[in-house]
Structures are given as C-alpha cells and as structure tokens.
Amino acid sequence: MLAHEGHHDAGGCKIETGDFPVTVSVYEVPEGDIPPMHSFCNHVPDAGKINMTIEISDLDTREIPIAVRVVMEGHEGSEHGEHEVLYMPAEQYLSGIIVVATELEHLGQYFVLLETEDNAGNVKTAVRVPLHVGGGGHGNHGSGLGMLEMIFIVAAVGGLAFFFMRKKNAEKELSKESQS
C-alpha cells in the first residue's frame, strides 16, 4: 500500500491495552492536493493537520456508543493537566472504523481517548492511544533510515564499487598490453 511505503504493514498498528483492541493509522495531511504518503503509529514528525483511522475489530464493541477525545498533555487549566483539542460525541461505529480529522498545532504528547459509559452511566476512558508530535523522522523509526533510503544507499554503494572495479580492471589490462 502506497501510504505505508514499507514502514508498517497495511493493517496499521495494534493497540491492545484498554477495554478492547484497536488498530490505528495516523496520516499527516500535506499542503496542497498531495495525498498522505506515510502512515504513523504513535509518532508524527511535525505539528499540523492529521487524519487518523481507528479500527474496532470486535463486533460487539462496534455496537457500543464511543466518544472520541483528543487531548494534549501538560497544559494547565483543566483538572487533569490536559488540553482538549477535539471532542466527537458518542456514537456507534457499526462499520468498525472511526475517522478522526484534526489539527495538532503544538509539538508535544497527545492522547486519543476512546470513551464509553460504565453500567452506572459514568464516562470512562476505554482505550488510550498515545501520539507524540515533533522530532521529525518517519513514525516509530525516529530520524533513522527507512526501507527506501536503505535501498538507495545499497544501490549507490554497489554502483560505485562496480565503477571502481571496472576502472581498476581496465588499468590492469592496459598495463598488461603495454608490457607485451
């Protein structure tokens, strides 16, 4: 799949902590009419607009109303020290896909909270998805090299080795001919 470019399998990133498992893919929305090129798990290189898909695989969970809240950690002014970026009211996701589109304006640590109600009607966080923004790089790979970069380096080194070996062999042939 183009959007993953070898960085992750096409199925996204599994989050198995919480009340039910989910699979998450986060995409930076580039400027202009360019489609998103990389899928990320829990790290986005830069602040800006993102699209996130959250897949709920459990069929029973799809029938439970789920609210989505995106918060940034460490902002004062709320009881938990978190700043709310986005709130989507509770609804059933019968297709199993939650689509979140928002803008993460600041570098730092965010959380995507999937909220449900317990038997007493109290709202609780069922799943907490961490999302770090900033530091560049390609998702969980930090600023290291991805698969495409590695292929390019290997091809460049191989091409240079071929060029120099061929030149060296040509010089040997030339020196043999001049000695005879």
Image: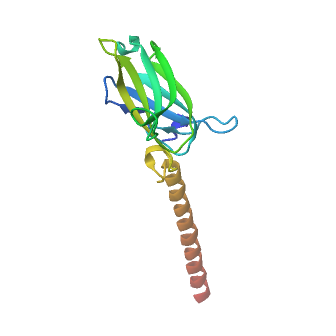
Residue name at image x 45 percent, y 39 percent: 76
How many marks are shown on the rendered structure? Answer: 0
Of residues 120 and 4, the one nearer the viewer is 120
Q: Would residue 117 appear left or right of 77 to someone viewing this image?
A: left
Q: Is residue 170 above or below residue 98?
A: below
Q: Is residue 84 above or below residue 144?
A: above
Outermost residue to the right: 32
Outermost residue to the bottom: 179
Q: Would residue 129 appear left or right of 147 to someone viewing this image?
A: left
Q: Quadrant of residue 174?
A: bottom right
The colour style of the image is rainbow
Q: Quadrant of the C terminus?
A: bottom right
Q: Is residue 27 visible?
A: yes
Q: Is residue 85 above or below residue 119?
A: below
Residue name at image x 52 percent, y 40 percent: 5
Residue name at image x 59 percent, y 73 percent: 167
Q: Is residue 11 visible?
A: no
User: Residue 57's x, y, as percent?
Assistant: 38, 20
Q: Is residue 82 above or below residue 164?
A: above
Q: Quadrant of residue 176?
A: bottom right
User: Residue 130's x, y, as percent?
Assistant: 41, 36
User: Residue 152's x, y, as percent?
Assistant: 54, 55
User: Residue 142's x, y, as percent?
Assistant: 45, 50
Of residues 83 and 20, the one nearer the viewer is 83
Of residues 61 and 118, the one nearer the viewer is 118
